């Protein structure tokens, strides 16, 4: 794994975060043996430490997670110390659209108002990264209901305006985004133009008066989070440990994003064993790019062909003879990895994935029993791999005063709730250094914020496999069936006539599905009957 680079002999690392004003103390450490230590910081005093009422969940502070069902997008409400002195965390709120339910982001805001804001406060808003499906709601008028009622805002270091690394990254993303927007605007009806347009949709919708300004809508949403809520943000670095006075009984570990440029660019290559289904996706891509040209293809723009027409195969027999050999897996090493025709799409994917790798990834630990809830946003390969840098760990003092070393692998082993990254696409859940390390299979539960029908309708049609079949199967196996989707509720066997679930048919036999169904029925701490949200409760 690539090591993180340092500009000098001494580097600054954060030891603690979470003050009301968003400040962070820093400590100079040697580059060797960098340790992320948990330090005490000044935080705003809690208004009350008295229990409001008897908890129905015993002595442990319960945690409730609500996954809203607004379509292809993330919006999670995490409530700590349920039924007692509740504290509320909103992680993202956005969508690319909704094909399955009628839930709108305004409905979510109304829920926040009626359940929290009318009698209390939203203690922290977390905006993980600059994508429409995570931030779009923050552009709506309804979100003004949050103004003055939020105590803390947490963002990744990548969003800090005066951070040199963040500035460099932002310039690269903006330049690439503008170039891609020009391609999409110049050829809106071409296959490439449509693909680029849909991929750029994550960055935002173009403004009416500026068709090239894809990122403007997301920028506006992030600016509202940064300045409009009435609280100064805290910008978190990888390795931060949050032990706030207002959140007793919990620690929050900042796993990412890394600062290493190579890791930020590590999106997962074709054939990578670290990401579920990426080899399969590479083969599908190669087969599509190398298919024989149809008559319709021949009539398409000459600019969309790699060679002059006299060099193309026109004889059908030649095509039939050469095609199988050309697409043989043994010939993959000879092919151009992405293909000339898909370069624009490739760069759009690169922009999308790079932004995903800037995700603020959080692991929430309940101190009393060590159980962990994992929220990696849309982190891709480089972000996940960076968590396992030998120099990244936390030194924690236990109840006996003894110091123990906490690593990402340790946190993953204790994970009981996993918010699946990027709608369970094939490239946003690490295998060996991610899901396979989640060893608590008797409790592990996965929530997938997805609208599969909407995803399949994006260009090229049917290519956005969310959830991806290999990952979906492994999640079901690791969680013993406790997998919940925003669009369907509990994961269930695909019906023979269900076109939306066609690629997910025959994942397992009837006996296995029956066992998973039994596991779901026994999981009374999980609810899927509410149209607005699915709910998980850690008692």
Image (cartoon, rainbow, N blue to C red):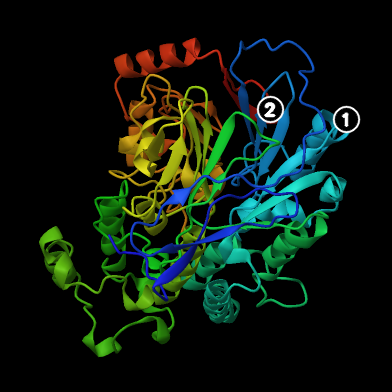
What is the tally of numbered marks visible in this picture? Answer: 2
Which residue is farthest right? 118
- Asked whether, in this view, residue 7 is left or right of residue 90, the answer is left
Find residue 167 and report its image quarter.
bottom right
The quarter in which the C terminus is drawn is: top right
Residue at image x 42%, y 14%?
519
The quarter in which the N terminus is drawn is: bottom left
The residues tagged by marks 2 and 1 sit, at their Cα atoms, a distance apart of 24 Å
- Asked whether, in this view, residue 82 is left or right of residue 363, the answer is right
Q: Which residue is mark 1?
A: 119
Find residue 508 and report its image quarter.
top left
Which labelled disc corresponds to residue 531? Answer: 2
Residue 413 seen in the current view: yes
| 301, 201: nearer the viewer | 201
Q: Position of residue 73 (x, y in %)?
A: 60, 47
- Above or below, 415 against 109 in this view is above
Residue at image x 26%, y 68%?
290
């Amino acid at each position: 794994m690539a090591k993180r680079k340092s500009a000098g002999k001494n580097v600054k690392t954060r030891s603690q975060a979470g003050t009301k004003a968003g400040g962070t103390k820093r400590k100079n450490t040697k580059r060797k043996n960098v340790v992320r230590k948990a330090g005490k910081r000044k935080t705003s005093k809690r208004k009350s430490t008295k229990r409001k009422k008897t908890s129905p969940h015993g002595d442990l502070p319960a945690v409730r997670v609500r996954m809203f069902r607004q379509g292809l997008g993330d919006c999670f409400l995490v409530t700590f110390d349920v039924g007692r002195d509740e504290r509320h965390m909103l992680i993202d709120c956005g969508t690319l659209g909704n094909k399955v339910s009628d839930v709108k982001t305004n409905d979510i805001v109304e829920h926040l108002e009626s359940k929290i804001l009318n009698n209390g406060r939203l203690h922290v808003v977390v905006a993980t990264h600059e994508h429409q499906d995570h931030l779009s709601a923050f552009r709506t008028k309804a979100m003004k209901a949050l103004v003055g009622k939020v105590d803390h805002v947490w963002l990744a270091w990548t969003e800090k305006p005066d951070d040199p690394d963040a500035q460099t990254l932002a310039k690269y993303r903006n330049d690439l985004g503008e170039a891609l927007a020009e391609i999409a605007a110049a050829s809106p009806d071409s296959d490439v133009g449509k693909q680029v347009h849909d991929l750029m949709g994550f960055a935002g919708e173009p403004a009416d008066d500026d068709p090239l300004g894809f990122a403007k809508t997301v920028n506006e949403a992030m600016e509202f989070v940064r300045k409009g809520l009435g609280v100064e943000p805290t910008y978190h670095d990888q390795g931060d440990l949050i032990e706030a006075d207002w959140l007793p009984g919990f620690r929050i570990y900042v796993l990412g994003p890394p600062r290493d440029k190579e890791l930020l660019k590590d999106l997962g290559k074709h054939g990578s064993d670290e990401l579920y289904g990426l080899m399969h996706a590479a083969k599908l891509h190669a087969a599509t790019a190398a298919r024989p040209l149809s008559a319709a293809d021949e009539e398409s723009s000459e600019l969309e062909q790699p060679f002059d027409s006299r060099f193309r195969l026109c004889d059908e027999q030649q095509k039939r003879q050469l095609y199988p050999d050309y697409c043989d897996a043994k010939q993959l090493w000879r092919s151009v990895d992405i293909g000339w025709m898909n370069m624009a799409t490739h760069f759009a994917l690169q922009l999308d994935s790079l932004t995903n790798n800037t995700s603020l990834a959080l692991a929430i630990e309940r101190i009393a029993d060590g159980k962990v809830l994992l929220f990696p946003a849309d982190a891709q390969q480089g972000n996940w791999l960076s968590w396992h840098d030998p120099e990244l760990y936390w030194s924690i003092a236990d109840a006996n005063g003894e110091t123990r070393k906490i690593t990402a692998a340790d946190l993953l082993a204790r994970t009981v709730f996993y918010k699946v990254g990027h709608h369970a696409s094939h490239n946003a859940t690490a295998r060996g250094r991610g899901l396979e390390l989640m060893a608590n299979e008797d409790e592990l539960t996965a929530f997938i914020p997805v609208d599969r029908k909407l995803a399949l309708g994006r260009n090229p049609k049917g290519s956005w496999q969310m959830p991806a079949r290999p990952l979906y199967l492994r999640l079901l196996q690791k969680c013993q069936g406790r997998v919940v989707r925003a669009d369907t509720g509990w994961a269930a066997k695909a019906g023979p006539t269900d076109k939306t679930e066609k690629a997910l048919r025959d994942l397992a036999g009837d006996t296995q599905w029956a066992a998973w169904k039994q596991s779901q029925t026994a999981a009374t701490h999980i609810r899927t009957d509410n149209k607005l949200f699915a709910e998980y409760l850690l008692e």
